[in-house]
Image: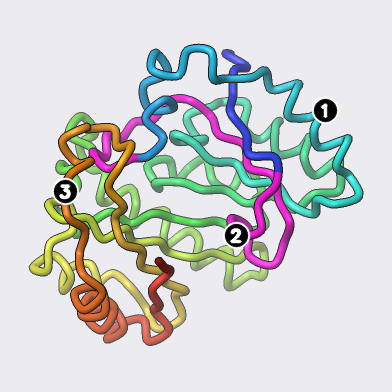
Amino acid sequence: MDDRVAFRKTSLVDFPGRVAAVLFFPGCDFACPYCHNAGLVDPARAEGELDELGEFYAHLDRRRAVLSGAVLSGGEPLLRADLPKVAAALRARGLAVKLDTNGSFPGRIEEVRPDYVALDLKTAPAAYARVAPSLPGAGERALESLRLLRALAAEGRLEFEVRITCAPGVLEPGDLAALAEELEAGDRVVLQAFRPGGCLDPAWDSLAPYSPAEMESFREAIARSAPGARIRGP
């Protein structure tokens, strides 16, 4: 197992209610063209930018008095067979664990025992080929993950949120009704606008994002199913 990783030493926004460090694992089974972690999706583009996992653990030990959480992110962290072991090492340091996932591995989520999960829903389930062309059934896998998270949350075993990045060409206005149909009133849903610049596909660096008015119309469409839906800005 390759122990090369990237990490953010301190974050006040990645783990709700906690000061956290963020661990980024290389590798992803999706190819979202707007992804800002291109060096993680394609590790060949991150040459010289990755550290050893042990360095992350050493950072946690040095910052023990400040940090209360750690985020497992990527890429797609659930690609790693040893992720439960990594999560256990974080809990052994007294840290709460958050998992960021695209939902393509519903059977692996529970093994990690996360305290909080951010599940990315990319678009309408039938349109997932736009972001995962080599992964048939990716949309249904994401929905299976969502159903699992609801069940675990009902048992008091974790908290979760659904994140929707509104990217032209991936999430179109016509996709909103189908996506909203999969959401429920109790789901915590956060919409965020696509940001051009530094994208996996350089053609997207000059693509205009949705306007604030368009983002609000998206929120209103999603709020018909999940009334608490909000926009994370800018």
* Residue pointed to by mark 1: 58
Residue 51 on image: x %, y %: 64, 19
Question: Could you tell me which residue is drawn at 15 percent across and 41 percent down?
Answer: 129
Tell which of 192 and 187 is nearer to you: 192
Q: What element carries label 2?
A: loop
Q: Is residue 197 above or below residue 56?
A: below
Name the mark on residue 207: 3
Disc 2 marks a residue whose amino acid type is Val
Is residue 28 within the magenta segment? yes
State which quadrant residue 154 falls in: bottom right
Residue 67 on image: x %, y %: 80, 50
Q: Is residue 138 above or below residue 169?
A: above
**Who comes first in sequence, dot 2 or dot 1?**
2
**Who comes first in sequence, dot 3 or dot 1?**
1
Q: Is mark 1 on a helix, strand or loop?
A: helix
Coloring applied to the structure: rainbow
In this picture, residue 10 sits left or right of residue 170: right
How far apart marks 3 and 2 lie (CA) works out to: 26 Å
* Residue pointed to by mark 2: 13
How far apart marks 3 and 1 lie (CA) works out to: 40 Å
In this picture, residue 56 sits left or right of residue 234: right
Question: Could you tell me which residue is drawn at 27 percent across and 43 percent down?
Answer: 34
User: Which portion, as a residue range, is magenta?
Assistant: 10-35
Disc 3 marks a residue whose amino acid type is Leu
Residue 150 on image: x %, y %: 49, 67
